[in-house]
Image (spheres, rainbow, N blue to C red):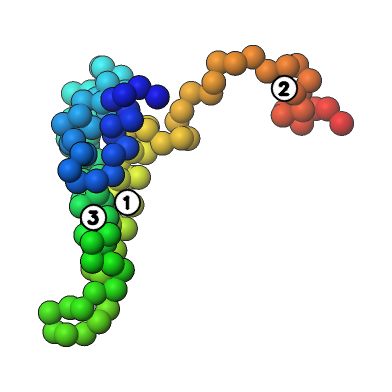
Amino acid sequence: MSNELEKLFEYDVINWDKGLFINTISQLLESEKLEQDKLTILMLAESVETFIKCNEEIRVNGLVVVHSNGVQGKNHHLEIRDKAIYRSLRLMAELKLTPKYRKPPPEKVSPELEALLRGGVW
């Protein structure tokens, strides 16, 4: 994995770089569609940033917190984080960045295995 891609997986607020994320995602997309996808890429970066900030808040304060009215309950950042994950996955699907859209590896498969995978060998 390239050094730039490794930096995308830094999950703490201090080291995560939204600009680097946007640039790297932009490089992964087809250049003729990039202009149309700029807003979607920005929304994805915002969603990922929300996810990271919520994770930091959950790490610091825990899953259960005492709210301002003195009642103990779940940390509200859990729900915000979950919505950010859902939104990020939808935007990634829109940009065709999910595993479903990955190209298969170029390696050659043996004819026997290929026939087996197609269901033709018994």
| Residue in front for this viewpoint, 61 or 69 | 61
* Quarter of the view holding residue 67: bottom left
**Left or right of 45: which side holds 9?**
right
Q: Secondary structure at mark 2?
A: helix
Q: Which mark is residue 41?
A: none
Name the residue located 45 percent from the left edge and 31 percent from the top edge: 101
From the top left corner, tell me how far across and down residue 107 is, in percent: 60, 16
Name the residue located 29 percent from the left edge and 73 percent from the top edge: 64
Mark 2 vs mark 3: give the one in front: 3
Amino acid type, callout 2:
Glu
Question: Which residue does the numbered mark 3 point to in the structure image?
Answer: 56
Question: Which residue does the numbered mark 1 point to in the structure image?
Answer: 85
Amino acid type, callout 1:
Ile
Q: CA distance from mark 2 to mark 3?
A: 46 Å
Question: Which residue does the numbered mark 2 point to in the structure image?
Answer: 114
First-in-chain label (1 vs 3): 3
Name the residue located 32 percent from the left edge and 28 percent from the top edge: 5
* Quarter of the view holding residue 79: bottom left
Sort mark 3 into few (<14), some (14-19) or many (20+) by Cα contacts within 10 Å. some
